[in-house]
Image (spheres, rainbow, N blue to C red):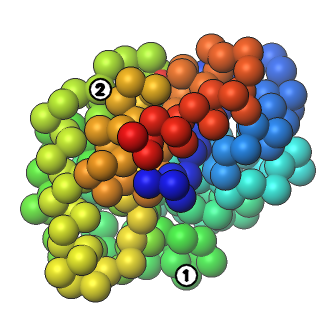
Amino acid sequence: KTSLIIAPSMLSADFSRTAEEVESINKSGAQWVHLDVMDGMFVPNITFGPKFIKDLRSHSDLVFDTHLMVDKPERYITHFAQSGSDYITVHAEASVHLHRTLQMIKDSGCKAGVSLIPSSSITSILPILDMVDLILIMTVNPGFGGQSLIPSTLEKISELASIRTQKGYKYLLSVDGGVNLSTVNMIAERGADVAVCGSAFFCEQDRSGFIQAMWDKARQ
Ligand code: DX5
Ligand code: ZN
């Protein structure tokens, strides 16, 4: 797929040099910036909140793709919308009234995303597929960068791509976890539109070379 969107995740950036790191994403050719928010409850790690995103906003014109790994994310939608997020994605497992939460995101002026952890099937999100702009399929258990992609999660990409065609839905399919030069083709061939990429991007010195190589691999 030639149009694959690459979203480097700031989770793997050096947090003592965050402005330079986001500027390296700007220059790399990647189209989006992925922002992993963790609360130490929904996932066993803690990262950053809306102020971090707001401060980064003036260092990039790219699409800000905020991934909330937070219990009861409805409590924070307004804060993350005001921080300059373009997409706000919540976990189906973290929000009881998922329809209401997604509506809150849309009412805040942002694009609404829903995410599934590896052990969740697509059944729970079928009733809200008509209202989402993005589905984020987790291909690792969320919480940490640098893990290996779990192959059994890939089927969900194909399933959601085929439902999209059948029903005429418009959502983007994004894939998050263990995406690198060896796995990007597996997700692209199943219909992924967005590849989130943390450790594989930030461990590279030549970041534009890496993005170009990802596009080449996605097409093979
Ligand atoms: C995992 C995060 C991912 C993470 C991916 O909990 O949601 O966005 O940064 O990192 P890699 O690409 O290293 O698996
Ligand atoms: Zn993420």
Left/right placement of residue 44 relative to residue 156 reads right
Residue on which the image places disc 2? 149
Say above or below: 120 vs 144: below
Instruction: Judge whether 172 appears above or below 180 on screen.
Output: below
Closer to the camera, 55 or 95?
55
Three-letter residue code for mark 1: Asp
- The residue to which callout 1 is attached is 107
Q: Is residue 168 left or right of residue 163?
A: right
**Quadrant of the rendering where the N terminus is positioned:** bottom left
Q: Residue at x 22, y 27 (%)?
A: 150
In percent of width and height, residue 148 lies at 32, 19
Nearer-N-terminus badge (1/2): 1
- Mark 2, Cα crowd under 10 Å, few <14 / some 14-19 / many 20+, is some
Residue in the image at 73% along x and 15% along y: 205
x then y, percent, for residue 216? 52, 39
Residue 218 placement (x, y as % from top left): 44, 42
Percent x, y for residue 151?
Answer: 18, 30
